[in-house]
Image (cartoon, helix red, strand yellow):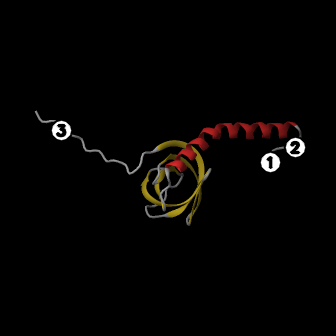
Amino acid sequence: MEQQRLETAERAAPRLPLSLPGTLLAVTGNQNCILVNLSRTGVLIALPEPLKVGAEGYLRCGPIDHFMVVTRQQTGMNALSFDIPVDDHFVFGIRQYQEGQAEREQEEMIEAVMAWTSGKGLR
């Protein structure tokens, strides 16, 4: 009996799952987005209005401030590639950034509450 093999597409680089808020700056306008995953070659982001394949823009998300090109479009999602691939050290730095994100958000909330209760209002 012959065994059948399923052919699977191999990715150029492993993906790091994330959930970070960011902004995509494009010719068509700026959009808030969520960084869903990251690799050395690109990202997957969730957008209110995905861009067409071939569109270009800058992704700003924490320490990420890179020029990107849309390589794939799905409902609510875009895959984008870096114009210059990043190294493993950069990917690891983004992981560390995400790990500190919740702590930073909590500190910002505490500062806002303290400002509000002291009569300074929200900034």
How dense is the environment of label 2, judged by Cα within 10 Å: few (below 14), some, or many (20 and up)? Answer: few
Circle 3 residue: 4
Residue shown at the point (54%, 50%) measured from the top left: 90
Judge left or right: residue 71 versus residue 117: left
Question: Do the CB atoms of the residues marked 1 and 2 lie less than 8 Å apart?
Answer: yes
Number of callouts: 3
Q: Hey, what amino acid is under mark 2?
A: Lys
**Picture quarter with the N terminus:** top left
Name above or below for residue 57 compared with residue 123. below
Of residues 72 and 100, the one drawn nearer to the viewer in this rendering: 100
Q: Hey, what amino acid is under mark 3?
A: Gln
Circle 1 residue: 123
How dense is the environment of label 3, judged by Cα within 10 Å: few (below 14), some, or many (20 and up)? Answer: few
Of residues 23 and 17, the one drawn nearer to the viewer in this rendering: 17
How dense is the environment of label 1, judged by Cα within 10 Å: few (below 14), some, or many (20 and up)? Answer: few
Question: Between tags 3 and 2, which lies in front?
Answer: 3
Query: Disc 1 to disc 2, how far (Cα)?
Result: 8 Å
Can you give x and y, in whole percent of width and height, for residue 109 in the image?
A: 74, 38
Query: Disc 3 to disc 1, how far (Cα)?
Result: 62 Å
Query: Disc 3 to disc 2, how far (Cα)?
Result: 69 Å
Q: Dot 1 lies on which element?
A: loop
Residue shown at the point (57%, 46%) measured from the top left: 93
Circle 2 residue: 120
Q: Earlier in the sequence, mark 3 or mark 1?
A: 3
Q: Disc number at residue 69?
A: none
Name of the residue lying farthest toward the left: 1
Q: Hey, what amino acid is under mark 1?
A: Arg
Question: Do the CB atoms of the residues marked 3 and 2 lie less than 8 Å apart?
Answer: no
Q: Dot 2 lies on which element?
A: loop
Residue shown at the point (45%, 45%) measured from the top left: 15
Name of the residue lying farthest toward the right: 119
